[in-house]
Image (spheres, rainbow, N blue to C red):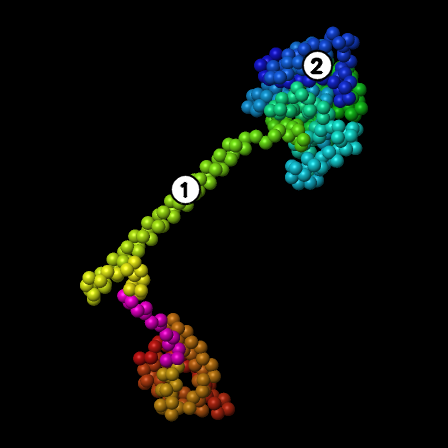
């Protein structure tokens, strides 16, 4: 016996049938297990051979849970739990739990209102999940501690790893019971004498054997006396779901933490508001001192009021005039210069850039001599002019005039 706290109810089949061929013939053979979990002293089970050895699966599971730092579980005998896999193509844990019972309804063989269906974990194959089906009477048993997680005894043995598509069994035999885990996560427990029949009905899958030797009719690979430790993913499962989910607890500490965060946020906001108020008061005092000094130069002895904004506005220098565009002055200068020289000119196209100042004009005049004269007139008028190639057709000459810089 170990010191781990475990609770076991009477081990029977799913329909209250003995789980072993060695079931006692009279009530005197039923022995007390004396589990150490609080409130479970009257819990008993039918021993298969020896009351001390039939708990080996549960003790192994309880020890592993304790070593993982989790709360001591309430363990349901493996014979009372069915582990099945099902494809549930919905998203979200809550939606999967709601759809799981209907996905397994045709495989349960009992009315849904008489069984409890718990979502365990993903099966590792697409949308498949592992589910545990247990009679609601087990979950509603008065011996079950309300604060203890519920685990099936089957989880004492981890699922083996299959190397191909064929399933593999891991079989742990002890005290006349054979605990079986399948590579897809499912599992069950039968009396050891019944194992050959079940094995043949399953298609004689490959077996890894632990613990006591298996019946000679079962072909198995002997792996040792001690099986691998339970899977951590199995230990994290709790069958207390749905109507049997534990009542929400621990909300008071969460509420206290939330209140502390809110209070801290309010304090930060108040500190920022206070700092802003002090800064604004300091700025107002500085503005009043500036206004008072300016008024004292004109009207000594006059005390300014609290609102010094009008005085500061009058004292402020006028804003600088925005710079104007050089386009119109430059174009006017070009036009005036050409008109003063009595040069008839037409502008077919013009473009302007402000930085740097650049005015491009496509100038039309009666002849090439007029274009040359216009260039000289503009340069003599103080403009920087660059001309492009000139052309003359049908009595009209034209050339590109580029005037850069502001007029001198």
Q: Are marks 2 and 1 in contact (CB under 8 Å)?
A: no
In the picture, which quadrant includes the C terminus?
bottom left
Would you say residue 212 is visible in this rendering?
no
Q: Which residues are magenta?
A: 314-330
Residue in view at x 41 percent, y 45 percent: 269
Does residue 96 appear in this view?
yes
Q: Is residue 339 above or below residue 262?
A: below
Q: Secondary structure at mark 1?
A: helix
Between 356 and 298, the one nearer to me in the picture: 298
* Number of the label disc, if any, that sits on residue 267: 1
Compared with 244, 361 (above or below) is below
Left or right of 49 in this view: 403:
left
The image quarter in which residue 326 lies: bottom left
Tag 2 residue: 45
| Quadrant of the rendering where the N terminus is positioned | top right
Q: Main secondary structure of the magenta part?
A: loop
């Amino acid at each position: 016996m170990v010191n781990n706290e475990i609770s076991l109810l009477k081990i029977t089949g799913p329909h209250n049938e003995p789980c072993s061929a060695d079931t006692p013939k009279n009530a005197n053979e039923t022995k007390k297990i004396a589990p150490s979990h609080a409130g479970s002293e009257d819990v008993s089970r039918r021993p298969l051979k020896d009351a001390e050895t039939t708990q080996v699966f549960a003790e192994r599971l309880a020890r592993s849970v304790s070593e993982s730092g989790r709360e001591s579980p309430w363990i349901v005998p493996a014979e009372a739990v069915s582990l099945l896999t099902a494809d549930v193509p919905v998203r979200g844990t809550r939606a999967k739990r709601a759809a799981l019972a209907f996905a397994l309804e045709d495989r349960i063989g009992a009315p849904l209102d008489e069984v409890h269906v718990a979502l365990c974990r993903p099966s590792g194959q697409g949308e498949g999940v592992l589910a545990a089906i247990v009679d609601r009477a087990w979950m509603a048993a008065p011996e079950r501690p309300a604060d203890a997680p519920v685990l099936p005894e089957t989880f004492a043995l981890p699922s083996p790893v299959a190397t191909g598509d064929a399933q593999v069994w891991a079989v742990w035999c002890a005290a006349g019971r054979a605990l079986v885990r399948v590579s897809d996560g499912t599992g069950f427990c039968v009396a050891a004498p019944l194992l050959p029949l079940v094995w043949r009905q399953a298609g004689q899958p490959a077996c890894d054997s632990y613990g006591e030797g298996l019946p000679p009719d079962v072909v198995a690979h002997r792996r040792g006396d001690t099986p691998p430790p339970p899977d951590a993913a199995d230990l994290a499962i709790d069958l207390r779901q749905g109507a049997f989910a534990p009542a929400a607890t621990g909300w008071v500490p969460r509420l206290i933490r939330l209140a502390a965060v809110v209070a801290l946020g309010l304090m930060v906001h108040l500190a920022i508001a206070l700092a802003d108020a002090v800064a604004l008061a300091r700025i107002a005092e500085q503005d009043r001192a500036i206004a008072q000094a300016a008024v004292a130069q004109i009207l000594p002895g006059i005390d300014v009021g609290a609102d010094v904004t009008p005085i500061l506005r009058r004292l402020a220098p006028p804003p600088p005039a925005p710079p104007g565009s050089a386009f119109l002055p430059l174009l006017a200068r070009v036009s005036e210069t050409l008109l003063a020289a009595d040069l008839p000119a037409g502008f077919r196209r013009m473009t302007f850039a402000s930085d740097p100042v650049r005015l491009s004009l496509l100038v039309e005049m009666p002849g090439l001599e007029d274009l040359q004269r216009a260039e000289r007139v503009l340069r003599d008028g103080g403009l920087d002019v660059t001309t492009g190639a000139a052309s003359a057709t049908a009595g009209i000459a034209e050339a590109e005039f580029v005037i850069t810089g502001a007029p001198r």
